Amino acid sequence: MVPLSYYLVLSGILFACGVTGFLIKRNIITVFMSIELMLNGVNLSFVAFAAQWHALSGQVFVFFVMVVAAAEATVGLAIIIAVYRTRETLNVDRINLLKL
Amino acid sequence: MTPNLYLWLIPVLPLVGAIINGLFGKRFSRQTVLAIALGFSGAAFVMALWIAAQFSSLALPHVENLASWIRTGDFQVDFAFYLDQLSLVMLLVVTGVGLLIHIYAVGYMWEEGGFYRFFCYLNLFMFFMLTLVLASNYLLMFVGWEGVGLASYLLVGFWFTKDSAASAGKKAFIVNRIGDFGFLIALFLMIKHFGSLNFAQVFRIVSSMPTETAGAGLLTAIGLLLMVGAAGKSAQLPLYVWLPDAMEGPTPVSALIHAATMVTAGVYMVARSHMVFDRAPQALMVVAIVGTLTALFAATIGVCQTDIKKVLAYSTISQLGYMFMACGVAAYSAGIFHLMTHAFFKGLLFLAAGSVIHAVGGEQDMRKMGGLRHHIPWTFWTMTAATFAIAGFPPFAGFFSKDAILWKAFSSPYGSWVYWAFGVFTAFLTSFYMFRLWFLTFFGEYRGEAAEKRGDKHIQVINSRPVAPAPYEHGHGGIHESPKVMLIPLVILAVLSVCGGWVGADRFDKFLSPALHAGVTANSQEETAAATPAPEPKEQGGSESLLTGISVLAAASGLFLAWVLYQKRPQLPQEIAHALGGFYETVVHKYYVDEIYAAVFVKPLIDGSTRILWQGVDRDVIDATLDNSAEGAREVSDAMRHMQSGNLRSYAGWIAAGAAVVIAYMVWTGTR
């Protein structure tokens, strides 16, 4: 059996990749994907712990996260399309109409 | 059943006059203003006479309670008035001389701006002075005491557009505060130890206390503190400096406040508190020494002054010194006697000096007068009476009172020949400087040229309004006699200066003795006599007339010297001044006392206030704290502002960093 620490390290790496991508990427689609990456990094650690401790609640959490992520992806992509139609760009730094 | 004398009406009448004139006087004509002012102060005088008329049938001291003022626990102060022989004398002097000076002021101030304001202040002064005199407890007395100080401030600074007048008013007020500080502490001591400020209660408690012959105690402390207050109000060393400057006020004010009444309040207060002083020989000695030194000191300055009002001002200080000398040898009645005669002749001297100044068009420098006796004969003759009175020639009033003081200074159990010697020498100086003034002003050739134009001093117009024609003939141009309204008070006061002393010191003493010796039991008198090695009864009759002879001789030699120096050989004074050199300079500059005070007290105070309190504490600490904390808040906010850039990813970065820190911390604590 693969030890728990492997899962956790992988989960951390995924999360860190997500954070990094979120911070350094300017394309809003990529940012969006980085968020998904972070969510799934967390999901991985949830299921790993659930398997380790034979506790179902971890897996239930993961389902919740996946549902929220799906809803988020739907709404997010809709927003992105709307933004692209009005601004004709996907660069987050230029979507700053609300900034003073 | 004692009759109700409505004592409270006496001070309140002038107050009503002051309020009416103060509130509405601006709209009144001059005639209305003076009718109100003279009417109310005249009514006070009539009431004083009415009380004097039925005085013999009263049970004394007569106390009337008007209303309660402060009641807290056992301590109680009332608006109550106290009438005994002492306050009756003061009452008559204040209302009588006050009324005469009011009348005089009508003529003197007629052409000045702020006519109603002047009479409002004058009536206000009367109110406070009568409160002071009639109060039946120290606190009400203190109210009057402060009130006359206020009135004095307002009147000294009456021509407030003139810088010197405004600052003279402030100086008078501030120097008086120093004295009042002592007075207040004395009152606090009384409250703490006697639990009361009522004269009757305080004196009852004090009379049961032993004489403090062995060492200074509570009574000595109270006595000395009261003396500090008296020295401030009555211009004694070292607090006399305000009085000469106070001559910036209009001359009737100098006569009323700074000669006849207010400045004698200190003497009155010491005499009123005689119970305390009788039991505190050291305090009494301080009073006598201060009085004696002041008398001599001021007289020497008076010799060298050239401003006619300044001479009189120093003369007033000197005469007040005599009064304190009398009080200091426990001869209170002699002091009050001199107070009364001094009110007559010094009031007259000031009024006559005002008449002279009026005549020569505002000139106050005696060197620019001279030969005025033919031009203003009424003023000349009245002033002559006053001059002889103050110099102490018999049978003028000043002779009797001054002689009484000198005799008591010599013969009293507290007295000593030293006081007497100083007193006689001062009498000589007094006679000299008064006759110097007299010769310089009225004899010789006229030395001024300002006769044709009326002085600029009279064109001080504040609240200017067209001047109503004076209700009396009043020729202008040239040296001219003052109008009748000014001369009548002069004549009345001249009569009083001549006759005022005929009542005699002994009869006066007998009249006052219930007020001034009450409570000095025969027992304690013996004690004091036994305690102080009293001078043996110095062959009373013979030595008294000898001493009288000496003091008259001193006065006569003062007259003679003044005649030689200023009449016969007018060049001599300059030669003498030249010969004396530095000493003469010192005296002319009033011993540099003002300069010394300025260097020792005023300048450090101003510098300290400027450098430490203003620039140091206020600007560098208080302001700086506020400014710097505001500046700091702004800078910190400026730095913090950059965190909130609106850049979403930088927020996320902060969150990630924060999360990383939390995790690192958890890992670190978990692995330990």
Image: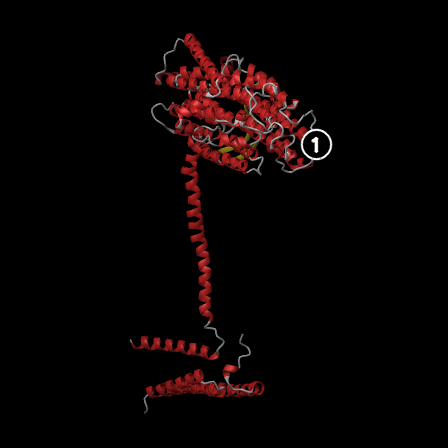
Which residue is label 1 attached to?
B468
Image location (x, y in percent) of residue B141: 52, 30
Q: Nearer the viewer, residue B414 or B563?
A: B563
Quadrant for the N terminus of chain B in the image: top right
Residue at the bottom extreme of this rendering: A1
* Left or right: where B87 falls relative to B480: left
Q: Nearer the viewer, residue B300 or B6?
A: B300
Whole-percent x and y of residue B605?
Answer: 43, 41
Task: Determine which quarter of the picture holds residue B541.
Answer: top left
Where is B259 relative to A13, above or below? above
Q: What sort of colour scheme is used for the picture?
A: secondary structure
Q: Position of residue B482 (x, y in %)?
A: 63, 23
Q: Chain of mark 1?
A: B
Near-viewer residue (B59 or B288): B288
Q: Which residue is more in the foreground, B320 or B275? A: B320
Q: Amino acid at mark 1?
A: Ala
Q: Residue at x 44, y 69 (%)?
A: B639
Mark 1 lies on a secondary structure that is loop
Image quarter where the C terminus of chain B lies is: bottom left
Q: Residues within 10 Å of mark 1 (few under 14, many from 20)?
A: few
The answer to whether B424 is drawn above or below residue B478 in the figure is above
B369 left or right, relative to B574: right
Please tell me how many numbered marks the rendered image carries: 1
Is residue A34 among the parts visible in the rendering?
yes
Residue B584 in picture, x, y percent from top left: 42, 26
